[in-house]
Image: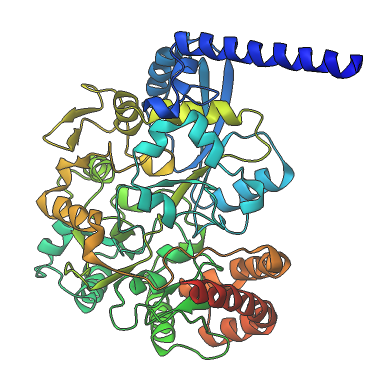
Amino acid sequence: MKLRHRMGKAWLLLVVLMLVLSACAADQGGGSASSGETSKPAEDPGAAENEPLEPVTLKIMIPGDRPKSMDAVVAEAEKRMAGTLNVKLDVQFIPWSDIDQKTKLVLSTGQEADLIFDAPWLHLNEMVEFYEPLDQLLQQYGPDVLNTRPANMWEANKISGNIVGIPLGAFQSGTPSSNHTYLVRKDIREKLGIAPIRSYEDLVKFMYAVKEKEPSIIPFSTSNSAASMSEATFRFQYDYETHLRTTHALGQSLVLHYKNNDGKVYNLFDEMDPKFWEYVTNARTLYLDKIIDPDMMATKGNHQLLKAGKQAVGSIPDFGVPTDIQAELEKNVPGAVLEAVTFYQFEPGKNISNFVQGNFICVPVASKNKERAIQFLNWAHQKENYELLAYGIQGVDWEEAGDKLYKPLGDGYRWFPYAWIWNPTHDRLNASQGEDAIKANQFIMNGDNFVADILTGFSFDSTPVANELAQYNSLEAKYYIILVNGVGDPDQVWNDFKGEAASYVKKIQQELEKQISEFLAKK
């Protein structure tokens, strides 16, 4: 009885104490659901930015070449964060040709890195286990990151139901909108008396004319030998017959592919697609005829030949002429002018999209600064900070050119928000690219212009075939890149490739088909 009596007293005291604490919380402004106020998360990112944090250096790995004014921009960013976030930025630019291997090595060996660029066409699905799920971190530390993207963008870009990377893009349509462009030396075209290019056949005629009449100029090359930029696969960006496109499993490779928006997986090792083979054999002809740069496989720079005035046609995954490329070209060859040539069809309903963005910024599991990395990205998603990192120092690197437009000043800071902070809320279009490029980009910003892919919302879990993917990827680097760039004999390369890779691809296909079937059954 005494024990029960003591326990009763203790319980009563506990209840009274809880009531007192609750009243105190209310007096201090702690709202409740019934009062219509929203309670704050345990960690308020705004408070964190106003209270000094321990200094930390974030290692950030992104693709491309370091801009000339990067140090000045980083210094200004660090100055703005001093005394609050206290973040130093170690931004490492990796050549496009090396980004796959270098970031994969860092991830797989647990090396120090806090933010890493990745993409579905790179190795995002393959390396997903090495990335931290970001749902809770973003809720706690990244409200501005969340609010600068519409809900449908987040939903379409989850992997297995989780936010594994922050989608980078300003287009509701996502990346499979084929916004690819050939960059053509307009001054050479006009010098040779050739009419404006309206078709791929016109483009090829121009390149042969360059070979004949301007022998010191390489008719065609790309920024690197990546499969997505190769002469053969680049043409599939304009495939309006079958809408053939890459799968969730093999990144840039079309060995496995989708077409006709039917939810099926097609395997080139089982049945060769005639259009694919036509493009491959055409690339081989162009290479043998010295239309394609003979040193294509050694190309690692960012349009270096084009900028130097030694190339007549290049290619980019974008609309319009990049101002930095034009500026450097004109500096090297006064009077040289680039024009953008695209075979994209700007008609609502002509293009299919799964609304997946092409680029992501991710936090490695091995990072020791996960919270601070998201806090930094949250800071970078505030308008003035975004514009600093996206366009450089205002008045020095850029100036406003109208609503949602900007104009670059000089060549000190090239555009690369696609690698770490790009979002539809703060993005500005480059007014210097001209009215056609602005209209083209505005078209793909509107998701209503696109037919939804039947696999919209699907993500591939590569874990069951991780070994097969690793084996295939090494063989892709050995054979596929050579094939689609026209560098090797197609029949021999294909037979060797198929002999070594077919069994791995079949297992990957079967797993992909299984997961797609389960996904479609739930729709």
| Residue 209, picture quadrant | bottom left
Q: Is residue 219 left or right of residue 60?
A: left
Locate the N terminus by quadrant.
top right
Q: Is residue 327 left or right of residue 5?
A: left
Q: Is residue 78 visible?
A: yes
Find residue 400 and report its horizontal and vertical position in percent. 16, 30
| Residue 358, placed above or below residue 242 | above
Q: Is residue 250 left or right of residue 451?
A: right
Q: Is residue 150 left or right of residue 158?
A: left
Q: Is residue 37 visible?
A: no
Residue ID at (14%, 46%): 335
Residue ID at (58%, 81%): 493
| Residue 518, picture quadrant | bottom right
| Residue 465, placed above or below residue 332 | below
Find residue 329 and report its horizontal and vertical position in percent. 25, 45
Locate the C terminus by quadrant.
bottom left
Residue closest to the eye, 123 or 205 = 123
Residue closest to the eye, 21 or 131 = 21
Find residue 392 and report its horizontal and vertical position in percent. 31, 27
Find residue 132 and report its horizontal and vertical position in percent. 61, 42
Question: Colour scheme in the image?
Answer: rainbow
Residue closest to the eye, 2 or 382 = 2
| Residue 364, placed above or below residue 462 | above
Residue closest to the eye, 509 or 270 = 509
Residue ID at (71%, 11%): 13
| Residue 261, picture quadrant | bottom left
